[in-house]
Amino acid sequence: MIFDQEFLDSVDSDPVGSIVSASNRTISSVELMDAHGGWTDSELNELQETAALIANIIEAHNLYSENYLPESSRNFDETCQQLFHYVKNVGEEFQAMAFDQKMSSLKDKYKTAINSTFAYEFSQGDLDRIQILVNELREQISSTDKLDEKHRQRLLARLEKLQSELHKRVSDLDRFWGLVGDAGVALGKLGADAKPIVDRIREISEIVWRTQARTEELPSNTSHPLLGEESDGNPNDDA
């Protein structure tokens, strides 16, 4: 394999950055093809491995790409060219996404630093638990066939953005409370089938509320007046 285990181990923590890195590395390696007048077997092998890796990262992390893995061709040069364009185009596509995420993250960090007298701070345990719940939400949303594709992609994009901006200290909690609205929409569309999604959003909301209540110096046992009691996932339930 052209990608070592250290690189593969880093994929889960930064799937978007890993796609960009893999693409840039391979494009830089094979872009000098004009110097020797044509494609080689080693270049084809590198393009195949990179394309397969990128496609797997996109699938495993439920990312959306406008580019699709090309079908095989009997023509050697055509196969290499198609794989080259796929790897290059996907890299450029996710480079833009990585840039947006980095800028958003930097803005949030500086906003917190500038307003250092006030920030919400998660415990490391709560932060780790939210990461787990977001990953589980991504799996639940991706596996349901009762949401239309646009709604599914919108929810997955929100989760991806939330996870990329998740830090111990944050200047506001708006992105988390937006999930409560998503839970209501999911409940309305899926009914009882929404329970796995709603349960995880509820748990995230409870963690966020504890953090907010602690920061605002409310009594430790103060419950959120809008979270209510645990529902069984029935949209007609008054609880």
Image (cartoon, rainbow, N blue to C red):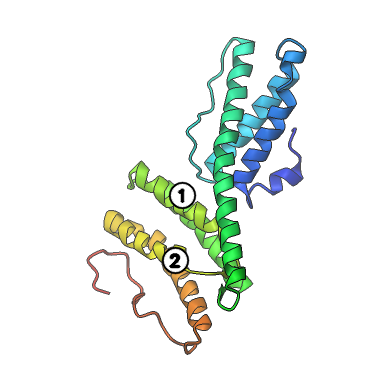
The numbered mark at residue 198 is none
176 versus 215 height, above or below:
above
Q: Mark 2 points at which residue?
A: 174
Q: Nearer the viewer, residue 160 or 234?
A: 160
Measured as percent of width and height from the top left, residue 194 is found at 35, 58
Residue at 62 percent across and 39 percent down: it is 19
Give whichever of 32, 238 is nearer the camera.
32
Residue 40 shows in the view: no
Q: Residue at x 58, y 34 (%)?
A: 92
Residue 17 drawn above or below residue 212: above
* Mark-to-mark CA distance, 2 and 1: 16 Å
Q: Nearer the viewer, residue 161 or 206?
A: 161
Q: Where is residue 117 in the image (x, y as percent from the top left)?
A: 59, 78
Q: Residues within 10 Å of mark 2 (few under 14, many from 20)?
A: few
- Mark seen at residue 157: 1
- 184 lies above or below 229: above
